[in-house]
Image: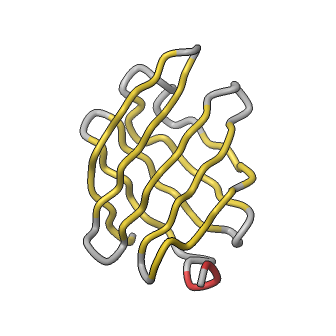
Amino acid sequence: MTTQLTGRSYRFDLGDLQVRFTFDSATQGSFVVVQGAGLAPDGHTETVALNLREIRTGVYLNSWTEASGATVTHLEDFENGTVYSNVTVAGKLHNFVGTIKEV
């Protein structure tokens, strides 16, 4: 159930791209770019509307569109601590695989 994530913060470590993400509610999240990998400025913060769907216990499909027009789609596997991320910036698709840790 997506309400299990509400109020929790996680670090998505995707190598050069690192983000602290908070699930404000089942439909809203906020993030801070810790390290932007050239895709976003370090320190950038934003609140976004989420399209969050539980695939199975501990696994979620999470997507959003940022104010810049960038789109993000994650498969977040909290059970195994893994995130698969597809980010589109300026029409270019970037694929990442990394870890999820609660902070």
- Count of all numbered marks drawn on residues in the image: 0
Residue at 52 percent of width and 60 percent of height = 61
Residue at 36 percent of width and 49 percent of height = 84
Q: Residue furthest front?
A: 55
Residue at 42 percent of width and 78 percent of height = 58
Looking at the image, residue 59 sits to the left or right of residue 101; the answer is: right
Looking at the rendered image, the quarter that the N terminus falls into is: bottom right
Residue 22's place in the image compared with 86, above or below, is below
Residue at 43 percent of width and 47 percent of height = 19
Residue 76's place in the image compared with 95, above or below, is below
Residue 76's place in the image compared with 25, above or below, is above
| Spot occupied by residue 5 in the image (x, y as percentages of width and height) | 56, 77
| Spot occupied by residue 39 in the image (x, y as percentages of width and height) | 46, 23
Q: Nearer the viewer, residue 17 or 94?
A: 94
- Image quadrant where residue 97 sits: top left
| Spot occupied by residue 13 in the image (x, y as percentages of width and height) | 31, 49
Q: Nearer the viewer, residue 100 or 71?
A: 71
| Spot occupied by residue 37 in the image (x, y as percentages of width and height) | 36, 26
Looking at the image, residue 15 sits to the left or right of residue 77; the answer is: left
